Amino acid sequence: MEYIPIQCKSAIRKVKGGMPYQYDVNIYRGCEHGCLYCYALYSHDYLNDEKFYDHIYYKENIVDILEKEISSPKWKKEMINFGSVSDSYQPCEKELKLMREVLKLMIKYKNPINISTKSKLILRDIDLINELSQVTDVNITCSIICADEQIQKIIEPNASLSIERMKVLQILKQKTNASVGILMMPIIPYITDSYENLESIYELAYRIGLDYIVPGTMYLRGKTKPYFLNKIKDYNFLLYKKIKLLYPKGSCLKEYKKEIYDKLNHIQKKYPL
Ligand code: SF4
């Protein structure tokens, strides 16, 4: 693993439509979590670097640049999402503590935030998350798609275990004023799409009192598609052939999508989050 410092000229990026927020900030480029389905692989192209999972760029001056932007009279305290193409709590954050400094800044300016993570490291900052959630909107999501640890270790090799992420959400729900939920995406055909797997995540989320689950099927676009399919091919050739048939393009076949959403509708009636 290589950590590479860079200087950024701007911090806040306007997001294209279709997301519940309009602005995001990436403190890191690249991500150590190593998810096979990572949709963000393309983002290393802008750095002329193929090693998305192994070369982690960190923006040394992110706090100063972000402060310049959010202290501007033009900035209207819009919600900022942290980490659309990287995880702000990936392992290097333990040493670098950039996200911790960013949270202090968000408190200073009472700026609403959204954080998505697959790491229990977020609990290190529960004091700051709680403080911010008392003065503005804070939303925390963990992506959780798989209850089986063995499978999870293959598809998300360096992320915290699903059960640890559930615990993280439970603690944040109990000890802060943030809204807290699960992104159950991407649902991966034949690997995480069984009724039992999906139901077990809903059941636990319901039991521990989370606010929501947002499910979604998998997209395989750009370089993510060959990367994911080659990894599955190495793992199980028959499975690879079945998944490939479902993905003639970047999105799965609509018949399959309907099947998944029928399942989800049935489960959601049992666990009305
Ligand atoms: S945590 Fe997100 S950004 Fe990181 S590898 Fe996984 S999908 Fe990609």
Image (cartoon, rainbow, N blue to C red):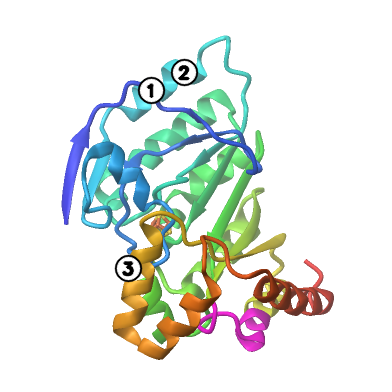
Q: Could you tell me residue 163's position as x and y percent?
A: 50, 76
Q: Quadrant of ligand 1?
A: bottom left
Instruction: Pick whichever of labels 3 and 2 is earlier in the sequence.
Output: 2
Could you say which is closer to the camera, residue 214 or residue 36? 36
Q: Which residue is mark 2?
A: 69
Residue 268 pos. (x, y %): 78, 73
Query: In front: mark 2 or mark 1?
Result: 1
SS for dot 2: helix
Real-space CA distance between mark 3 and mark 2, rounded to the nearest whole angstrom: 33 Å
Q: How many marks?
A: 3
Q: Give the CA separation, mark 1 to mark 3.
A: 29 Å
For mark 3, does the 10 Å Cα neighbourhood hold few (<14), some (14 to 19), or many (20 or more) residues?
some
Identify which amino acid the numbered label 1 is placed on. Answer: Ser
Q: Which residue is mark 3?
A: 158
Q: CA distance from mark 2 to mark 1?
A: 8 Å
**Residue indicated by mark 1:** 10
Residue 93, percent from left and from top: 31, 49
- Relative to 50, is 61 above or below? above
Are the residues at dot 1 and dot 3 in contact (C-beta closer than 8 Å)? no
Where residue 38 sits, quadrant-wise, is bottom left
Amino acid type for the residue under numbered disc 2: Glu
Q: Which residues are magenta?
A: 189-200
Q: Quadrant of residue 76?
A: top right
| CB contact under 8 Å: marks 2 and 1 | yes
Amino acid at pointer 3: Asn
